[in-house]
Image (cartoon, helix red, strand yellow):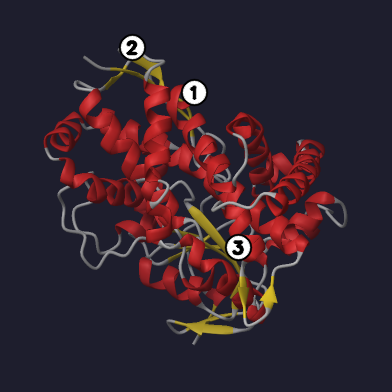
Amino acid sequence: MTALDDLQLPELDISDPSLNGDRFHALLAATAAQGWLARLPLGFLVLDREAGDHFLRSRSATFPGQMIAELYGIESGPLREEIDRNVLHIDGDDHARLRRLVNPFFTPRAADRWRPVMRGFLEQLWAQVDGACELVEAFAKPYPSLTIATVMGAPTSDAPRLHEWSNWIQRQFDGPSLETQRDRIEQACEEFYLWCGELLATRRGDPGDDLVSVLIAAEEQGDRLSDVELVHLVLNVLIGGVDTTQAQLSHAMRLFAAHPDQWELLRERPELVPQAVGEVLRHEPITPFTARLLTADVTYRDVDLPAGTLLMISAVTGNRDGAGDPAFDITADRTGARLMTFGAGIHHCLGAPLAWAELEEALAFLAPRMPGLRTTAEPALGTVQGIYGVDALHLAWD
């Protein structure tokens, strides 16, 4: 056995705000070529799929939300409440109970029923462009927030507010934002709690087939969700389903603009849409790293990792491990290269089926309408901290 501190490991700093795009991928690929583990300023980076899957599924590891809160002195208030109640930070019997009550609403079949709604929003957004657009503002930003508003049973007029709240609350996972913009994050939490309380009251008086109504009625052997649990589950859906889908759709269109042969192939063969979504999720996961904190001593691959060790699991290199040729190819056979983009184990992303459906509908809609897709300016990429998004993507088509 080897002690973790005795290992000779490559070192890198993934908090560099300029680290993105091709340089980001080249750095991670070069590091992964040296082994499955690298040293970070505050922990370690797990680089291959097998090891990443092991720690994501391990019962001796947890998401370090409370540790982040303590590190930044978040001891009380709306944000601390959100951190403590976030389903990502709940383990054991409490987590199993919550998932058991809400899972029926988040199956692929449940997501499929919202596809006509998604198509309707895409039609509305398409009517506002003509031959060119800045994709983030025109499609990627409004599309998921309109969809989530409808799924929740909220007025679509609330979609801009939902997007804003999601954007700010997501920054709880971004250290620099917690240092400089904590007051605005706190405000977003507080505003959402008030809004959601009113929505719960409305749906109780006028229930429908939306998410909030279904959660209010969710029951198993007499067990039901409390009001506090309802609010935070709705919040989890919001912050897990708006910025993420915006970022993933933006990267999808960026990748296709950079690979026009793949876009033309998708236009010619619409049956490739599901495989194209999988390739986008594999090639550019918008949650490049998922944190885990070891709650017990663990020995893995003859390395002793002590309790309290912080691990960052790399979906970027994990997705490409065992996938064959790393090129962006929507026809490639990726059998055996399981995606890590949505996590694994008990904390596998609850809204993954809805995200898949949104991305499939968007690509199926846009591909036949955008021949000759191309960028008209260099894409403006965000930071790989938290959600790795695209700040601006100027596109044109024939």
* Count of numbered tags: 3
* Quadrant in which the C terminus appears: top left
Q: Position of residue 300 (x, y in %)?
A: 47, 82
Q: Amino acid at mark 2?
A: Asp
Q: Earlier in the sequence, mark 2 or mark 1?
A: 2
Q: Amino acid at mark 1?
A: Glu
Q: Distance of mark 3 from mark 2, alpha carbons?
A: 48 Å
Q: Which residue is mark 1?
A: 137
Image quadrant assignment for residue 68:
bottom right
Query: Looking at the image, is 392 positioned above or below residue 187?
Result: above
Which dot, 1 or 3, sits closer to the camera? 1
- Give the residue at the far front of this rendering: 206
Q: Which residue is mark 2?
A: 130
Q: Which residue is mark 3?
A: 43
Left or right of residue 79, residue 137 in this image: left
Q: Distance of mark 2 from mark 1, alpha carbons?
A: 14 Å
Q: Secondary structure at mark 2?
A: loop
